[in-house]
């Protein structure tokens, strides 16, 4: 039997669940497929920029988010070797809540998923999409999925890929490379109790071959997340920075304690809660270009920014809003005929140009910051300048998108819910 919907959304991270909420509220029948049971921890620095708070409020999870998040993030710091420079973070003007916050992904993703269900989306979980096929005859898409060990088949005119970028996407294409490169960036994250880290401070870490960040998220727990090159991690393990039996995450922790005074001091009396999580390699870059035969891409599936600026969740949420604004305003996109297919293609083009206008700049900037942070020889000459003018850190946060959203939700409900999404 084939289950028919207006839209099938693959992946219930911030991008997928937001899209499911928005389309379900606009009256569409939506299936939201998520491979893993929730709540689940996830490699992420867990910082949500202030620019997203109005969107999360409009999605209906503002109050619950504030209850579970850590203190408002009002200061940013740079911790490199023995250096500790800090500055004020810019406020997001006009927002009821002008500063961002950090919230565990086990909370954020569950809140959004539950809101999608409450909005009328059919949530299938754990359910892994295995293949996406496009039919030229009636311009529909078929999705084969494994739901609790049973193979099911779904069909819809609109398929939205929100499956992130760290696992092979549902097969159909050769767009995924499994080649292992020394320069691959691997992601790690752990949570600590009793860390000596001021609530509301967001230190960015730079070290040879990697970068990261620390923050106090909910329940007073500190999150440490970072990316490190594969070859740098291997070299550090060979040199024995950690016990030979240590996991990769523990080896990263030993390296950070050794190389970064700020981390060493913050974790001096701290105890880790749970294990280190690992993910990746992460895949910074734009994938909007095509190859997915008519499916729409949002979040990391569309393009991944170096997480040094903590804007991945912003791009996930905002790309979902941009796309759903275009889709919900065009009911003819649901027609299973040539006209419907043409309309969807027009929406693809418009969405791609909005996406590029809003996100390409911050992606380029993040790449520059990431490469400088990973190379002490580039970073070293910049440090005296930052010491003299620490406010530059706040300016860097502003230009990397922290206070600017690609969309402004209206006070009223959906549909027709996007304002100011034009370039
Ligand atoms: C070290 C590190 C630190 C970071 N820190 C921050 C930060 O502080 N702030 C910030 O904004 N961003 C941060 N990011 C980036 C952020 O985590 C991502 O950009 C964000 O999670 C992308 O959201 P998404 O919804 O696109 O994808 P994801 O959050 O990856 O969600 C994708 C979902 O799809 C599911 N899925 C995958 N394949 C399938 C399938 N075939 N079928 C069904 N479901 C599937 C997955 O299980 C997952 O739940 C960080 C990243 C790293 C690596």
Image (cartoon, grey):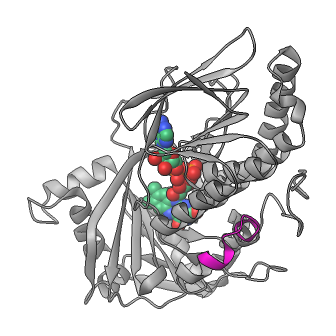
Q: Please tell me which residue lies in front, 190 or 339.
A: 339
Looking at the image, residue 211 lies above or below residue 23: below
The percent position of residue 190, horizontal first and vertical second, equals: 34, 69
Q: Inspect the magenta stretch and tell me whether residue 403 lies in it.
A: no
Q: Where residue 257 sits: x, y (%)?
A: 27, 76
Q: Nearer the viewer, residue 248 or 126?
A: 126
Q: Quadrant of residue 98?
A: bottom right
Q: Is residue 177 visible?
A: no
Q: Start and end of the magenta stretch?
A: 55-64
Instruction: Tell me the quarter of the image containing the N terminus.
Output: top right
Q: Residue at x 36, y 30 (%)?
A: 179
Q: Magenta stretch: dominant SS?
A: helix
Q: Which percent across, then down, holds residue 85? A: 51, 84
- Which residue is at a point 81% across and 21% down the rendered structure image? 341
Residue beneath the point at 82% across and 59% down: 407
Judge whether 23 appears above or below 308 on screen.
above
Residue 245 lies in quadrant: bottom left
């Amino acid at each position: 039997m084939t289950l028919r919907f207006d839209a099938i959304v693959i992946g219930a991270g911030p991008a997928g669940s937001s899209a499911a909420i928005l389309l379900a509220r606009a009256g569409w029948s939506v299936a939201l497929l998520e491979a893993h049971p929730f709540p689940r921890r996830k490699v992420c620095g867990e910082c949500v920029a202030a620019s997203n708070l109005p969107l999360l409020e409009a999605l209906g999870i503002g109050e619950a988010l504030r209850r579970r998040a850590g203190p408002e993030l009002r200061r940013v710091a740079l911790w490199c070797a023995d250096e500790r420079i800090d500055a004020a973070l810019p406020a997001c003007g006009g927002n009821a809540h002008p500063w961002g916050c950090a919230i565990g992904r086990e909370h954020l993703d569950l809140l959004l998923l539950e809101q999608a269900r409450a909005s009328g989306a059919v949530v299938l979980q754990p359910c892994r999409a295995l293949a996406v096929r496009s039919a030229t005859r009636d311009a529909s898409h078929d999705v084969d999925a494994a739901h609790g060990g049973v193979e099911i088949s779904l069909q819809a005119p609109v398929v939205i890929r929100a499956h992130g970028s760290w696992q092979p996407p549902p097969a159909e294409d050769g767009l995924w490379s499994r080649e292992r490169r020394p320069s691959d960036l691997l992601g790690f994250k752990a949570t600590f109790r009793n860390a000596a880290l001021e609530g509301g401070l967001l230190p960015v870490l730079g070290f040879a071959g990697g970068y990261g960040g620390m923050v106090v998220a909910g329940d007073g727990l500190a999150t440490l997340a970072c990316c490190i090159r594969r070859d740098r991690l291997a070299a550090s393990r060979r040199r024995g920075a950690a016990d030979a039996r240590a996991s990769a995450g523990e080896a990263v922790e030993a390296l950070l304690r050794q190389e970064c005074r700020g981390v060493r001091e913050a974790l001096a009396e701290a105890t880790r809660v749970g294990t280190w999580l690992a993910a990746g390699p992460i895949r910074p870059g734009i994938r909007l270009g095509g190859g997915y035969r008519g499916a729409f891409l949002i979040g990391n599936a569309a393009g991944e920014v170096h997480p040094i600026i903590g804007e991945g969740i912003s791009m996930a949420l905002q790309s979902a809003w941009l796309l759903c604004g275009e889709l919900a305003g065009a009911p003819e996109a649901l027609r299973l005929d040539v006209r419907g297919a043409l309309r969807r293609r027009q929406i693809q083009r418009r969405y791609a140009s909005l996406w590029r206008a809003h996100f390409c700049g911050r992606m380029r900037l993040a790449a520059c910051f990431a490469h400088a942070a990973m190379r002490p020889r580039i970073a070293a000459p910049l440090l005296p300048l930052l010491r003299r003018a620490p406010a530059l850190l706040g300016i860097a946060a502003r230009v990397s998108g922290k206070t600017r959203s690609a969309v402004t939700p209206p006070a009223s409900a959906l549909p027709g819910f996007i304002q100011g999404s034009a370039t």
